[in-house]
Every structure is written in structure tokens, then in C-alpha cells.
Image (cartoon, rainbow, N blue to C red):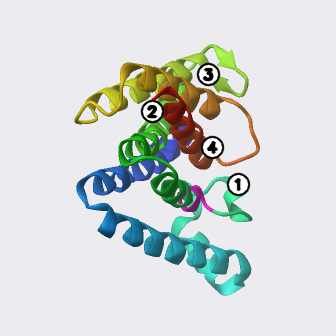
Amino acid sequence: MIRYTGELFRKSIHIASVAIPVSLYLLPESVSRPGLLAFTVIVLAVDVIRLHSPQVRTLFYFIFGKILRDHERFNLLGSTYLLIAALLCMYSFTKPIAVVAIAFVVIGDAVAALVGRRWGRVRLLDKSLEGSLACLTACILIARIYPGDEITWPMTLMGAFVATLFELLPIPLDDNLRMSLSAGFAMTVAS
């Protein structure tokens, strides 16, 4: 249960990142793009300093150590990859596709982890079938609640399926990066 509680706290922070796609949707691109670029550069710089400065690393681990994954101790943080993915999506895809693809990783990945850890029984690669189905469902819902008609049903299904697949597969690339970019590409192809 302790491990699930730690994951719950970590994923609550992850879900708070919904502010990224919401702000990208609400703000004009003339504000959101440079704002996201500046924020990403700052976070990336802090993360790189953390990796190379023993003093900063010690302070960082004292504050955030309980929510870090083992691989993040010597690599970029998942949150840094999420910002890089959001930036790449905003500059690579149309605004509706970028917003939905980023929301897929923010919400879909969190739902997959929470459901999979709590109710997952059927193992699928290194994850659970239940978590993957929860991810797929969440991604479909996200795409369908996007205002307007820019995200069609074929785009919804293709993007949600690809996001879920890239969340599931054990590809040695952070899922915050691979889910959003693959889903954005899939929705672009399906449009």
C-alpha cells in the first residue's frame, strides 16, 4: 500500500500538469509558444544543473527524493521530458492535435499507472491489461471532450490507440515523450 500511496502522490503531481494543455488551449499561440519555450528551457537548465552539481542534487533529493523514480536519479526527470514533448507537439502539430496529444500523456499515463497498480491482475509485457484499458478509455474521453470538431472519431481512435500502445511498450525512451509525439503523429495521419 505504501508503494501505491507514493505512486498516487507522484501521479497527482502528474495530473496537475493538465495545466499545460489547458493553458495551450486557452492562450493564443503568440503567448503560449514562447511561454512554453521559456519555461521548458528553465526547467531543462535546472534539471541539467541537478545532474551535474552535487550540492544541488543533494538539496533536490532532500526535497523531492521520495517521489523520484530510480532512473531519474541519473537522467532527466519525467517532468522535463513532459515539457520537451509539449514543446515539440506545439511546434509539430496543429493546436488541437497538440493539446489532445499532451493531455493523453498527462491524464492517460496517470490513469494507466493508478488503475494498473491498484486493480491490475492480467500482466501484459511489464504493465497490466487493466491499466492499458484505462489509458485507452481516458484518451478516448479526452479527445471527445475537446471543444469543436477538429478532432474527428478516426483521429480519436487512432490517437488513443497509439498513445496506449506507446505507454505499454517497453521502449527505452521516456513515456512522456513517446506517448504524446506518437499520438500526435497518428492523429495527423488520420486527419
Assess disc 1: are there few (<14), some (14-19) or many (≥20) residues with their C-alpha within 10 Å of its C-alpha.
few
Queried whether the magenta region covers residue 162, the answer comes back as: no
Please report whichever mark, 2 or 3, sits nearer to the chain's N-terminal start.
Answer: 2
Would you say 31 lies left or right of 2 here?
Answer: left
Query: What's the distance in space between the residues labelled 1 and 2, CA to CA?
Result: 21 Å
Tell which tag, 3 or 4, sits nearer the viewer: 4
From the image, tell me which residue sits under label 1: 70
Query: What's the distance in space between the residues labelled 3 and 4, CA to CA?
Result: 19 Å
Give the numbered dot on residue 128.
Answer: 3
Please report whichever mark, 1 or 4, sits nearer to the chain's N-terminal start.
Answer: 1
Amino acid on which the number 1 mark rests in the picture? Asp
Is residue 94 or residue 64 the one in the foreground? 94
Residue 23: quadrant of the picture: bottom left
* First to last magenta residue range: 77-81
Look at the numbered discs 1 and 4 and tell me whether their residues touch, using CB distance below 8 Å: no
Position in image of residue 181 (x %, y %) = 57, 44
Q: Is residue 113 visible?
A: no
Amino acid on which the number 4 mark rests in the picture? Arg
Q: What element carries label 2?
A: helix
Assess disc 4: are there few (<14), some (14-19) or many (≥20) residues with their C-alpha within 10 Å of its C-alpha.
many
Q: What element carries label 3?
A: strand
Amino acid on which the number 3 mark rests in the picture? Ser
Tell which tag, 1 or 4, sits nearer the viewer: 4
The chief SS type of the magenta part is: helix
Give the numbered dot on residue 178.
Answer: 4
Amino acid on which the number 2 mark rests in the picture? Val
From the image, tell me which residue sits under label 2: 111
Q: Is residue 33 above or below residue 14?
A: below
Position in image of residue 176 (x %, y %) = 57, 47
Q: Is mark 1 on a helix, strand or loop?
A: helix
Q: What element carries label 4?
A: helix
Please report whichever mark, 4 or 2, sits nearer to the chain's N-terminal start.
Answer: 2
